[in-house]
Image (cartoon, rainbow, N blue to C red):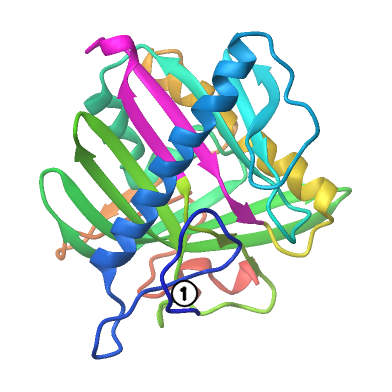
Amino acid sequence: MATRAASGLSQEIIIPHDQHGNVDWDALGRMSVEHILHEVTKVEVAERRHQNGETDGVETENDWRYAYEKHNIVVFSKKLRGSPIKCFLGRGVVDAPVRAVGDFTGELQSTFTWDNTLVGVRCVKVIQKSTNCADYIWYQLYESTNCLIKTRRDNLFFVRCIYADGKYVQSAISVEHPDCPTLPAIKRIRVYSGSGWVMEPYLGSDKKTLVTYLAHLDPIELPAIISNRLIGRHPLAIHYLRLHLTHRPVVSSRPAPSTTEHSNGEVEVKLQSFEESSSCSEFIGDKYL
C-alpha cells in the first residue's frame, strides 16, 4: 500500500506511516476525515444547482452531479479520472439529534439495519477510544445469491468516529491486519478514503440531522455497470437509518444477530449461524469457504 499523502478522492489505498515504519493511525484518521468533509463542501455546489432547477451539463471527471432521488434522499455521483466506477453521495434529513444518529452508526452492529446481505461483523481492534473520538479496525462478511450462485465478499477497514464542531464524522478506508488475511473464496471489497458518514444539525435545529453518506469503493471483479448500480444504492442507507431511529423497524427474515463483548472491550456481532472465534478465518468458518 502507498505511503504518500493524499488529496481529494482517488482510487488508491494510501496509508501513512511514522518514522519507524508503523501505521500512523492518527494521521490516517485525520486524512480520511478531511477527505469526506472536503467532498461534502464540494457536493453543496451540485446540490444548489439541483435545488435551483439547473442542469448539470456534460458529465466531467471529479465533479459531483445529480443522479436520482428516492425516499427523500438526494443522491449525487462523481466520475473519477481513469476509472469506470463512480462514487456516490446521498443526503437526507433524520428526525433525531446529531449525537443520537452518530452514536447509532458508530455501533458495530448498526449496518445490519440497512444491509440485508451482511451476515457477520467483528471488531478486530480498538486502536483508541475516548468520549468524542474512537478508532477501530472492523471486519464485515457479506453473502448474496444471484441466479442460484452464492457470492461472498468481505471488508476490512479502519474507521474513525469523531464528534467535533457540532458535527459527527465516521470515515473509513481499507487496511490490512494479520488476523484477517484475504481468502481465495472470498472477494475483498476495497474502500477508498472519503467513504463514510457526516451528520450535522439541519438548519440549526438540535432535533433534526442532515445526514450525508459517501460510498467510494470497489466491489471487485464485477462489470462497471453492475458495480455502479450496487454502489449507487448505498446512500439509501440513510432511509433505513431514518426508519430505525423513528421507531419504524425494517422487517427482516434473518435471525437476530448475537453480540459478544470480550474482556478487552472488543465486540463481535454475528448471525446465529456463526461459531465463536479468535481470528477472521475462524470467525468465517470452513462452511463459508
- Is residue 252 something that shows in the picture? no
Q: The C terminus is located in which quarter?
A: bottom right
Q: Is residue 97 above or below residue 237?
A: above
**Residue at label 1?**
282
Q: Residues within 10 Å of mark 1 (few under 14, many from 20)?
A: some
Instruction: Identify the magenta region.
Output: 196-218
Q: Nearer the viewer, residue 282 or 240?
A: 240
In the image, taking residue 171 as reference, residue 26 lies left or right, namely left
SS state under label 1: helix
Residue 270 left/right relative to 147: left
Q: Residue at x 42, y 54 (%)?
A: 172
Rendering coords of residue 179 (x, y %): 40, 79
Q: Residue at x 46, y 59 (%)?
A: 7
The question of residue 21 being in magenta is answered with: no
Residue sitting at 71 percent across and 63 percent down? Answer: 220
200 part of magenta stretch: yes
Q: Amino acid at mark 1?
A: Glu
Dominant secondary-structure state across the stretch colored magenta: strand
- The part of the image, by quadrant, that contains residue 16 is bottom left
Determine the image quadrant of residue 70.
Answer: top right
Residue 275 coordinates in the image, percent (x, y): 44, 64
Left or right, 221 with respect to 3, comes to right
Q: Which residue of the protein is positioned furthest toward the left in this rendering?
A: 131
